[in-house]
Amino acid sequence: MAFWEQIAEGLLPEEAAGVIGVAQAVGARWFHHAGGMPPFDLKFTPTGRYLSFAEREEIALLRAQDRGVREIAREIGRDPGTVSRELRRNAATRGGKLEYRASVAQWKADMTAKRPKAAKLVTNPRLKIYVQQRLAGQISLPDGTPFLGPTPPRFTGRNKPHRKDRPWSLAWSPEQISHRLKVDFPEDESMRISHEAIYQSLYIQGRGALKRELVWCLRTGRALRAPRERSRRKTWAHVTAETLISERPCEAEDRAIPGHWEGDLLIGLERSAIGTVVDRTTRFTMLVHLPREEGYRHKQTPKNGPALAGYGAITMKNALANTMKTLPTQLARSLTWDRGKEMSAHAKFTVETGIPVFFADPQSPWQRGTNENTNGLLR
């Protein structure tokens, strides 16, 4: 519980392990086995119906003093029958005799309280095959022969591979699969599953429904889920009060007037890059060419040297300004970006183009949903 509370605060698994006093390898293993997702509800508060860990500690202390069942019950304010059952059911038996220890009793109680429900993809093979085929999105040659592309590295479940090492696929997203089921099987209610259930089957090992390697077919390719709070550890010196998304004109919200754009930077193989800007109303998309600058050498560029990859702040500003200067004034009202450092020169961009720049809140991709969806399709 304490470990996952620290993860929810934005700490890395190794850092959370240090806070609660366990080995870093143990914390990393907990995080990996759970797919980056807490195995229980962190906001759950137990009711007084069941014994708490504090009460079990009190029972253990009083029992060690040879107190009787009724005396213990009076001390903790419980019925004698409750105490008697607790001592009988949850006592440690490893030493060949019944010894009551609070930690063991709590573990036994938690195990007994579990009511595991089989995942829907486990109990419905037909649905599992449908989901798995569309997640894999296998590419075939004209004669029907499967073509996998590059051989991916060994799946460790720890991190995503480089995009060039991922298998080729025409994969569907979990959201697409979830909605398409209603079209393909309108009368069959058993062929229904939410996108979150698909994600959990992929990320949580204990579900046992889908192969974990299928996460490489997702658009992100991320092997573990990253907590939202982790993004708030970063500092955003280039984001000022007047550039927050809350200051964006209200007319941009309802998408009724064209000219309000969303933008982002896409990083490709060997640090190649391209900028994307999408109009919120018309979905018209423009790509910003970001060629590498002279002197760039992949993996041989000096650390902390000049930004030669083509998406440094000044290079990005110049390329984006050249692209958006071609727009009529009435179609260039605002630009909303994520908090990437490539837009650090946004003030100069606004002076040159007259287009105000606003930044989305941390870890809030839905505030730029049109652009995020477009980027996923482009990838």
Image (cartoon, rainbow, N blue to C red):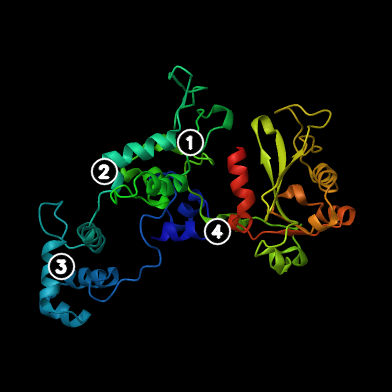
CA distance for labels 1 and 3: 52 Å
Counting residues from the start of the chain, the first of labels 3 and 4 encountered is 3
Q: Residue 64 sits in which quadrant?
A: bottom left
Residue that numbered label 2 is attached to:
124
Residue 86's mark?
3
Q: Secondary structure at mark 3?
A: helix
Pointers 1 and 4 in contact (C-beta within 8 Å): no
Q: Amino acid at mark 4?
A: Glu
Counting residues from the start of the chain, the first of labels 1 and 4 encountered is 1
Q: Nearer the viewer, mark 1 or mark 3?
A: 1
Residue 229's mark?
4
Position of the C terminus, as image quadrant, is: top right
- The residue drawn where x is 33% and y is 36% is 129
Q: Is residue 56 above or below residue 112?
A: below
Q: Secondary structure at mark 2?
A: loop
Q: Amino acid at mark 3?
A: Glu
CA distance for labels 1 and 2: 21 Å
Q: Nearer the viewer, mark 2 or mark 3?
A: 2
Q: Is residue 217 left or right of residue 349?
A: left
Counting residues from the start of the chain, the first of labels 4 and 2 encountered is 2
Q: Amino acid at mark 1?
A: Ala
Q: Is residue 35 in view? A: no
CA distance for labels 4 and 2: 35 Å
Crowd band around label 3 with a 10 angstrom C-alpha radius: few (<14), some (14–19), many (20+):
some
Q: Position of residue 166 (x, y in %)?
A: 52, 30
Q: Position of residue 370 (x, y in %)?
A: 62, 52
Q: Is residue 92 left or right of residue 169?
A: left
